[in-house]
Image (cartoon, rainbow, N blue to C red):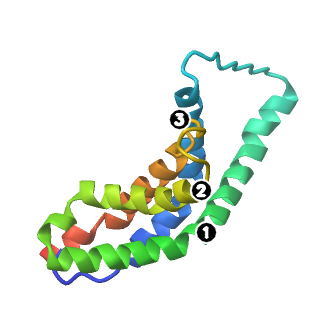
Amino acid sequence: MARATVRFGGVAMASLAAGPLFLLGAVISIPIQDPAAAIPIDIALDPASIGLIVLELPVAFVLLMMFGGVIAVLPNLIGNAALTWLGDRNPGTQLPAFWALVGATAFAAPVAALNWTWDEAPSGYLVPFVFTGACCALICRRGLEKEGAA
């Protein structure tokens, strides 16, 4: 990863993935907040449900990608540039685990600082932020080791 610059393809991919990753993190946090709670899943095979699955969910998914991408492009760009610069100076910071930890911390720390106090916060409220930050950092990192080896 020596002397690698910002890889805009990775930033674009991570930015487009930010919205769906945040939604996935929110879904994951539901059983974390109350593991004993039952999660009802009722699927009716009527025309309205099939229409929702075939037409409305893909449209909502594309809108979620665009909205999440607009929000995430600047943090992903700054994080990629900072971690690439740091990786050029310290080989230990080129590890994927380091990138994931930095991404998770960078996205979740401001939210944790601005929200509830620790004694009244639900246990899983940071999961979508930590999950999205770590995944976006790892997506941004993809391909950088190949550029440095060339």
Q: Position of residue 24 (x, y in %)?
A: 56, 43
Three-letter amino acid code at the position of disc 1: Ile
Q: Which residue is mark 2?
A: 19
Quarter where residue 34 is shown: top right
Q: Amino acid at mark 3?
A: Ser
Cα–Cα gap, marks 1 and 2: 9 Å
User: Helix, strand, or loop for circle 1?
Assistant: helix
Residue drawn 56% across the image and 27% down it: 31
Q: Residue at x 74, y 21 (%)?
A: 43
Query: In the rendered structure, which disc, 3 or 2, sits on the residue that comes first in sequence?
Result: 2
What element does badge 3 sit on? loop
Image quadrant in which the N terminus is located: bottom left
Residues at marks 3 and 2, CA–CA distance in whole angstroms:
22 Å
Residue marked by disc 3:
123
Identify the residue under disc 1.
71
Q: Earlier in the sequence, mark 1 or mark 2?
A: 2
